[in-house]
Image (cartoon, rainbow, N blue to C red):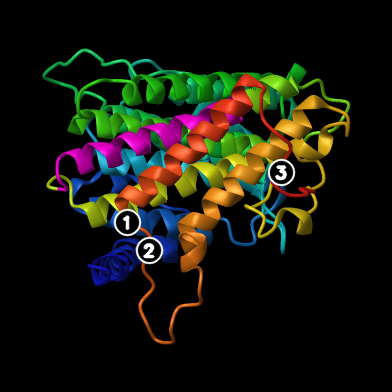
Amino acid sequence: MLFRPYLLGIIAFWIASLLGETIVQAQATTDFTLWKDTENAEAVPGLAQLMLVRDFRNVTGTAREELLARTLLALKDIASDANVVPSTRYNAILAAGQLVSEPRQGNPPVAYPAALTYLIEVYQEPDAPHYLKYGALLGIVRHAIIGIDADKQDRVIDLLLETATTEFEAGEVTLDSIPLEPAVWDWFRQTALDGLTALKTVGTDGRVVTELLSLINRKSLELEDLSGSQGMLTREDWGQSRRASELASKAAKTLGDLGYTSEIDIDAKKMTDTFIRLTKAVCDIEYKMAMDSIEQGGASPNPAMLLERIVINVKMCTQSIVWGIRSGFVPVSPAANRPVPNSFYDSLETDDPAMLRLDVLLAEIIELATFLDEGDQPRRAAPAANTPREFRFNLPELRDALAKTSEALADIQLGCQDAPRQNTEF
């Protein structure tokens, strides 16, 4: 299967060479009429890369600006043409997002500002196909990564926040459209979080933090509702819980990618409450999944597969929450790790009540992470040489570990926690 993309790439450049031979000889720019030919659809990705490299090589100043304007106009024409095959329209808008005003050796290039304006317009066009909108969103995120003008930053933040925090709504099904699936919309939302990560700002008055905390709390509520249900979880419930925990975890990780200082007014209690709630919600839903399987006698799903899935989901959540707190991975030992500068934890005053609660939360996460890696204390011997790595616990033991962590987190929520298990110094 890996050979096919490689082969298609060779074919694409070969076709591009044949189709563009006379063009190369006659002019330095791409003939975009070739892109609209359905027979050339598979060659368009190669043609796009050829255009981005060949057409703009050694072109600077006014000549480059004029070439950029002509190229963007041609790409807009292709992307807006309903008679062109969808894959070509998608590749056209992807190419628009890769246009650069100025390449720079060893540094990110300067993005073409006019392309960003176009991408935003397409993304906000109500009738634009979903695949075009996603191509535009990828371009917007790329601009966020390599840098955007200050006067456009707030507009981009608004767009990305709206995408990340908007819940899925089923659209009208027609003969001419394909309905958007919940998983696809979550894909949009996670991509928008990538853009917020790239911008590395809490936003005006901490708005990015506020909106992401609200998103995490909504997803935690979804997980709480599912884990509190009396019946067995259905396949649809499993899918919903997975999407909710993945999105909330990525939002928590995004919070750790922002820059914090003591001057920024962040509600530390609310942020701490949110991290504790999400950790407990994920432990509870994964506990219920394990419990459902055990009560069914391990018949469905396969206990070994379920064990692995639960471990992955819990690790994804806890690693993301630790990153949200301290902008770093789960510490190997609490006392051996200092907070990362400009992290949320580092921005807190030493007498802030949230700091003690975060220390307890981090201690619980470290304890759970150690169990997931090494099992119970009696089993924490080094594995024999040349033996395959395997979990040192079974499904019932994992269920009990999750229940133990959930109980400890409930105590933190109620404010009746003891001092941290050990001398934590993050």
Left or right placement of residue 389 versus residue 373 in this view: left
| Nearest to N terminus: mark 3 or mark 2 | 3
Local crowd size for mark 2, using a 10 Å CA cut-off: few (<14), some (14–19), many (≥20): some
Above or below, 124 against 188 in this view is: above
Q: Position of residue 166 (x, y in %)?
A: 45, 18
Q: Earlier in the sequence, mark 1 or mark 3?
A: 3
The residue carrying mark 3 is 326
Looking at the image, which residue is at 60% across and 32% down?
Answer: 114
Q: Is residue 371 visible?
A: yes
Q: Specify the quadrant that holds the N terminus.
A: bottom left
Type of amino acid at the residue the image marks with label 1: Asn
Q: CA distance from mark 3 to mark 2?
A: 28 Å
Q: Which one is closest to the eye, mark 2 or mark 1? A: 1
Instruction: Magenta stretch: give its range.
Output: 274-298
121 magenta-colored: no
The residue sitting at 67% across, 30% down in the picture is: 417
Question: Horizontal placement of 201 versus 361: left or right?
Answer: right
**Predominant SS of the magenta segment:** helix
> Of the residues tagged 3 and 2, which is closer to the observer?
2
Number of numbered labels in the structure image:
3
The residue at which mark 1 appears reads as 394
Asked whether the beta carbons under mark 2 and mark 1 sit within 8 Å of each other, the answer is yes
Looking at the image, residue 85 sits to the left or right of residue 381; the answer is: left
10 Å neighbourhood of mark 3: few (<14), some, or many (≥20)?
many
Q: Secondary structure at mark 3?
A: helix
> Dot 1: what SS?
loop
What residue does disc 2 label?
391
Helix, strand or loop at mark 2: loop
